[in-house]
Image: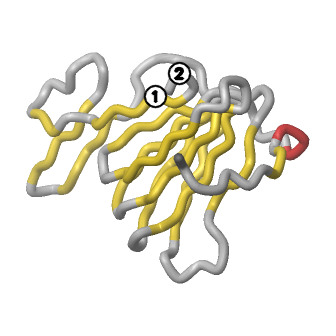
Amino acid sequence: MEKVQVRRLPVTTPPVPPGGGRIQSPAGELAQVVNGGTYRFLAYLEFRPDATKPRGNHFHNHKSETLYLISGRLRALYHDLGSGERAEMTLEPGDLVTVHPRCAHVYYALEHSQAVELADQPYDPTDTHPYEVGEAV
């Protein structure tokens, strides 16, 4: 799907490769998610499987956002509003997902999950447009 890019950061040893990676040591995990680029928004997100509503069910006209899954598992659904293409996937720890403008998205917690979101634009509530993604085909 053109408006959604997903890649799993590899578990590696120092030094971390240019594209990012995860180092696991006795002290804990270090994940280099990005190195370079310009980001204007950072948020921590918690996803609870007992939540009455999923996170998302919206799109942005201007903002591209990147989600890095720290822990847990998410069911992700996407709908490209331009092409009509739909996708569904299960996100695992270490997955890095970039969603571009005019791609509706929703995330369902399959278990307790934690993530960080990076965006190229500052938060603007007028650029969040409700949209029921529904089920992938």
Q: How is the image coloured?
A: secondary structure
Identify the element where label 2 is drawn.
loop
Instruction: Give how far apart the Cα atoms at labels 1 and 2 are.
Output: 7 Å
Look at the numbered discs 1 and 2 and tell me whether their residues touch, using CB distance below 8 Å. Answer: no
Number of numbered discs visible in the structure rendering: 2
**Residue 16 at x, y percent in the picture:** 20, 26
Which of these two is toward me, 134 or 2? Answer: 134
| Residue 11 as seen in the image, left or right of residue 2 | left
Asked if 67 appears above or below 110 in the picture, the reply is above
Furthest-front residue in view? 137
**Residue 25 at x, y percent in the picture:** 11, 50
| Residue 105 as seen in the image, left or right of residue 49 | right
| Residue 120 as seen in the image, left or right of residue 127 | left
**Residue 84 at x, y percent in the picture:** 66, 31
Q: What is the three-letter code of the residue carrying label 1?
A: Gln
Which residue is disc 1 drawn over?
A: 5
Furthest-right residue in view? 126
| Residue 29 as seen in the image, left or right of residue 125 | left
Snapshot quadrant of residue 57: bottom right
Asked if 72 appears above or below 30 in the picture, the reply is below
**Residue 73 at x, y percent in the picture:** 37, 61
Which residue is disc 2 drawn over?
A: 2
Q: Residue at x 66, y 72 (%)?
A: 53
Q: Residue at x 65, y 56 (%)?
A: 134
Identify the element where label 1 is drawn.
strand
Q: What is the three-letter code of the residue carrying label 2?
A: Glu
Q: Residue at x 27, y 35 (%)?
A: 9
